[in-house]
Image (tube, coloured by chain):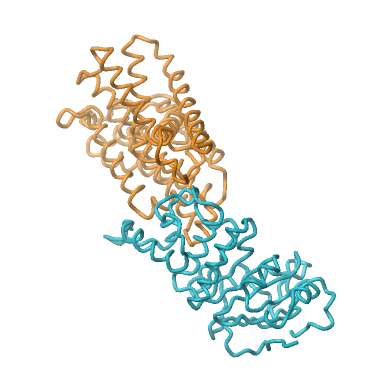
Amino acid sequence: MTESSAESPDALLRIDRINKSFGAVVALKDVTLHIPRGQITGLVGDNGAGKSTLIKIISGVLKPDSGAIEFAGKRADFGSPAEAREQGIETVYQDLALAGNLTVWANLYLGREVTVGPKFLHILDKRAMLANAGRMLGRFVKNAPPIDGPVEMLSGGQRQVVAIARAGAWGTKLILMDEPTAALGVAETKAVEDVIFELKRHGLTILVISHNLDQIFRITDGVWVMRRGRIIGYREKASTHPDEIVSMITGAAASTGTVA
Amino acid sequence: MIFARWSGLAGIAQRHGVFVVFIALVALMVATTSTFGTYQNLSNVLSQNSIIGIIACGMTFAIILGGFDLSVGSMTALASVVGATLMIELGTPGIPVGILGAVAACLLVGMTNGWLIAYLGVNPFVATLGTMTVVRGLIYVATNASPRFGVPYSFTTLGLGRILGVPNPAILFLIVALLLGFVLHRTRFGHYVYAVGGNSAASAQMGVNTARVRFAVYVLVSLCAAVSGIILVGQTASATPQAALGYELTAIAAVIVGGAPLGGGRGRMTGTIVGVFLLGVVANGLNLFGVSPFWQPVATGLILIAAVAFDGYSKRAVVAS
């Protein structure tokens, strides 16, 4: 059984002994991990294992109590999600992502609108955004929904495809996804996974939380397992089996699977 | 299938319903009365509805944002009382001071509304109901509830004068509507009003400063109320503390009739303008037919309910198709 070493030289993100507590509740305890560059990495664990807290720390929503984060070779100390985004870390949330009343192109450009004319007026350059949005979407999505229709007319899967494609544009290096297909049917899940593969093909690094082990084994290159705020271990997909991951998640293999 | 909404009868009715109703109403009025189409009557309709119209332009922003502003009537009265008082005290040279004073007073209320709603998270209903009541009370205290007379007569040019036969209030309404229509539909700020009204959390997630957008909208509404209050002074050369009572509800009704639902995220400036004149022409029609003016609020209320009910009905029809 090979365990990829946590010292892998080609890591986009390294987390070193991070701790986070909410009052008396310890959410993360000495969490150390790395995210290999250009790969799709899974993050699994039971409810309350600390996955979402970890994602929130990486994306700048929460600050760790102690420990260090290194992103793209530099120490990262994000004070806000905006700072993390500036550095190239985007997060895809389950349901907050899009404004249903706006068009697809307006959502792709939300917060990054192209403007023309006198600076203080901020007149929207709708034509430029409309023209570019098609390319932005087409880069990662094969059957892209119409970009000048409102998002509320799209299916849940199409919305998620738009949200993920948006996260991949704008010079992003790392995309964090929390249960990207939780509410989707089989065909829509497939469409979303295709987009995730396209992101990888374009050189992006992806960290995905999922409760669906089938999906983890379908799309990831390797997976980190957490339990009760601690890292239990990392397994490359080729050298593990769903049964092993399940036993790591539940604690049945706690004595054998530790690398951290 | 997905975009069925954009075609078919239900879609046309939903997108253009208020326009169709308005045109039919005007045609009906022209056909059944000899007086409606006269210059005198049309210019009356324009003058009478311009003050509400300017307020409704600002209200459109608040409603698309997902809120509304109940304090606009009180702010309009505040602007007219502050403006008139300064003009009376200072005479003709005091006119600019009066205008500035009226704007400053409304700005203060608008910034209070914006601060309460955007930064303290107070519900817009509660915040603006509060300022509506406080401001009206303060006006009564300051004036002892008695009107102010003696504004320099030259100032009535603003309220009663005409340019090329068009009443000046209507010209001001047109300017405000064009300006705010441009801001709403062409600028990033207007775009953010839709974004925040549609999904505030998603907008914040993507880096939109949602609090600043909210604050700015309530300030904008207060500026519209200031303009209306100043025109009111220009129409009467005086100010009454009881002025503009109930304007907030008429303005909100006009915006909703114009196609902007209270839930936010939707609506257009052209819809608001048609909504204003739809209610205005109905009131005018009742007047021309000799119906008691007491019936006017009844008509306004019924139109409001009909518009919202039809909107809900046509949406369900679209979903079902």
- Residue at screen point 38% across, 37% down: B225
Q: Residue furthest top?
A: B290
Q: Is residue B125 left or right of residue B46?
A: right
The location of residue B156, given as percent across then percent down, is 23, 29
The location of residue B228, given as percent across then percent down, is 34, 34
Chain coloured cyan: A
Q: Quadrant of residue A183?
A: bottom right
Chain coloured orange: B
Tell me, yes or no, if residue B104 can be seen here.
yes
| Nearer-the-camera pick, A108 or B161 | A108
Q: Is residue A249 left or right of residue B192?
A: right
| Nearer-the-camera pick, B102 or B152 | B102
The location of residue A137, given as percent across then percent down, is 44, 64
- Residue at screen point 40% across, 10% down: B292
Q: Is residue B19 left or right of residue A29?
A: left
- Vertical side of B80 occupied by B45: above or below: above
